[in-house]
Amino acid sequence: MTQKSQENILVVGPAWVGDMVMAQSLFMCLKVQYPDCRISVLAPEWSRPLLERMPEVEKGISLLMGHGDLELGKRRAFGKSLRGEQFTTAIVLPNSFKSALIPFHAGIPKRIAWKGEWRNLLLSDCRRLDTNAYPLMVQRFAALAYPDSNDPPVQIPEPRLQSDPASVENALATFSLGIENRVLAICPGAEFGVAKQWPAEHFAATCKTKIDNGWQVWIFGSENDAEVANEIMQMLAEEQRQHCVSLAGRTSLSQAIDLLSVAEAVISNDSGLMHIAAALDKPIVALYGSTSPDFTPPLSNKSKLLFTDIDCRPCFQRECPLEHKKCLTQLDPSRALAAITELVPTGRN
């Protein structure tokens, strides 16, 4: 049996939803390189619903330390507890020093990552990143499946989350939802800040048109997005609200994935839910304000990226430093509606 078939790989996963979705491209590349390899992912507990929908991942290992916590002693003890797993290779995706500690203490012989935050001695294969040669995050992830190179992999597979029909049916029943009418999913929140959030009135205007065309609207998001979801609902006429439901703060991540899987189209700010929708192969309209699609675009050929050409964008700020948010207010709802018409198969409007 070849060495390739014996690879037992630990991937230290990222801490953000969108980044974890993009990490699936790495897992896919590893399966191409080492068809019989075993892949375990060390990641926060919240990521389990995503990992369970990635067939390449054999096991998720919950990282119980907080995102910002160093906790050297706990990381050393946790690493030593993994020695019995006999991992042959570790791939570290976050750039932090602490993220490389657990594979080091686990005694994993090959420890691969990009150079970052004084961790060179913790790695056996520490690579220098040329950001011009590797402009996309997914390129940086996928490259770690292969020997060090000046160029990113030529072919990088797009993430594809699997949905379980029984789980989908259960989620629909839990929230008393039906799919007799076509579903427009909207994701009006963004954890990074309000400078990434399309105005509520623009979402509402888009919803009004689609509801009048016979669609229904489901609003997705976390508890932090419940307020803007309610704001959008209140902008609809009473009759239109009968065809719109806010799920913000009500679903688990698992339920959100299952419900997004039956949407006909998705409109989303630059957020983790945008990447989930793309990985579910949903037609998606991605809205960009303060950020840019040049680093982390939705990885799907069914996406339309909308942004304005205002001079001050992208500023990558959480709040508009000029206090006008023109990068988003000037992104007219008509553009989102036109994008949906272009993305969704003809004859079904």
Image (cartoon, rainbow, N blue to C red):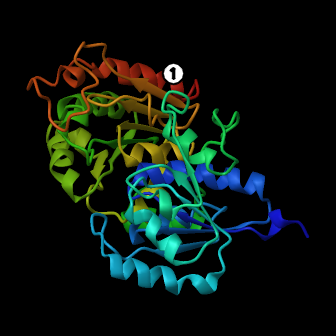
Quadrant in which the N terminus is drawn: bottom right
Above or below residue 274? Residue 93 is below
Q: Is residue 82 left or right of residue 305?
A: right
Report the label total: 1
Quick one: 179 or 132, which is closer to the camera?
A: 132
- Residue 85, image x, y percentages: 63, 82
Q: Residue furthest left?
A: 323
Quick one: 236 or 148, which is closer to the camera?
A: 148
Neighbor class of circle 1 (other Cα within 10 Å; few <14, some 14-19, many 20+) is few
Give the residue type that dot 1 points to: Glu
Q: Which residue lies furthest to the front in this view?
A: 121
Q: Is residue 101 left or right of residue 149?
A: left
Residue wearing tag 1: 342
Q: Which residue does the image show at 40% across and 62% down from the upper left?
A: 253
Quick one: 78 or 241, which is closer to the camera?
A: 78
Above or below residue 1? Residue 225 is above
Name which quarter of the figure residue 54 lies in: bottom right
Q: In this view, does 69 lie to the left or right of 26?
A: left
- Residue 335, image x, y percentages: 36, 18
> Is any part of residue 180 visible from this angle?
no
- Residue 140, image x, y percentages: 54, 42
Above or below residue 220? Residue 310 is above
Q: Which residue does the image show at 70% across and 47% down from the upper left?
A: 147
